[in-house]
Image (tube, rainbow, N blue to C red):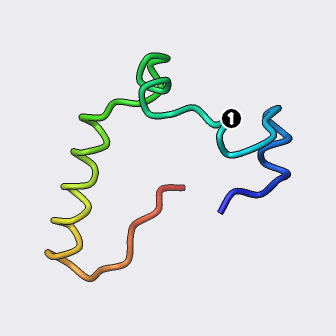
Amino acid sequence: MTAPHFLSAFGMETLRDLPNVEALEDAGLLSRHAVQSEIVASQSDDTETEEEPAFIE
């Protein structure tokens, strides 16, 4: 869910104003390969351990 306040804070009126994956990649803000790698890593982490995530202060 996206709050109306979030959209207005970034000068958007609707969810359609949010950039798509291609626009984020073109701007250098997103790498589809990196996202896929993170998904695979998180899935393997979930099956290997049930520990709480560690936080770095």
Query: Where 9 falls versus 45 (above or below)?
Result: above
Residue named by callout 1? 17
Q: Residue furthest bottom?
A: 50
Tell me which corner region of the image, top left, top right, bottom left or bottom right, holds residue 8: top right
Relative to 3, residue 16 above or below: above
**Quadrant position of residue 17:** top right
Amino acid type of the residue that numbered disc 1 sits on in the rendered structure: Asp
Quarter of the image for the C terminus: give it. bottom right
Residue 9 occupies which quadrant of the picture? top right
**Mark 1, secondary structure of its residue:** helix
**At x 16% / y 76%, what residue is drawn?**
47
Residue 56 sits above or below residue 34 on the image: below
* Front-lying residue, 11 or 44: 11
Give x and y (percent) for residue 16: 65, 40
Left-right relation of 57 to 26: right
The residue that appears at 26% across and 82% down in the rendered structure is 50
Q: Residues within 10 Å of mark 1 (few under 14, many from 20)?
A: few
Residue at x 57%, y 32% (from the top left corner):
19
Q: Relative to residue 32, is residue 21 drawn left or right?
A: right
Location of residue 16 with respect to 49 vertically, above or below: above
Q: Position of residue 44 (x, y in %)?
A: 15, 65
Query: Which residue: 44% across, 19% down?
Result: 28
- Coordinates of residue 1 in the picture (x, y in percent): 65, 63
The one nearer the camera, 20 or 51, is 20
Q: How many marks?
A: 1
Q: Is residue 54 left or right of residue 38?
A: right
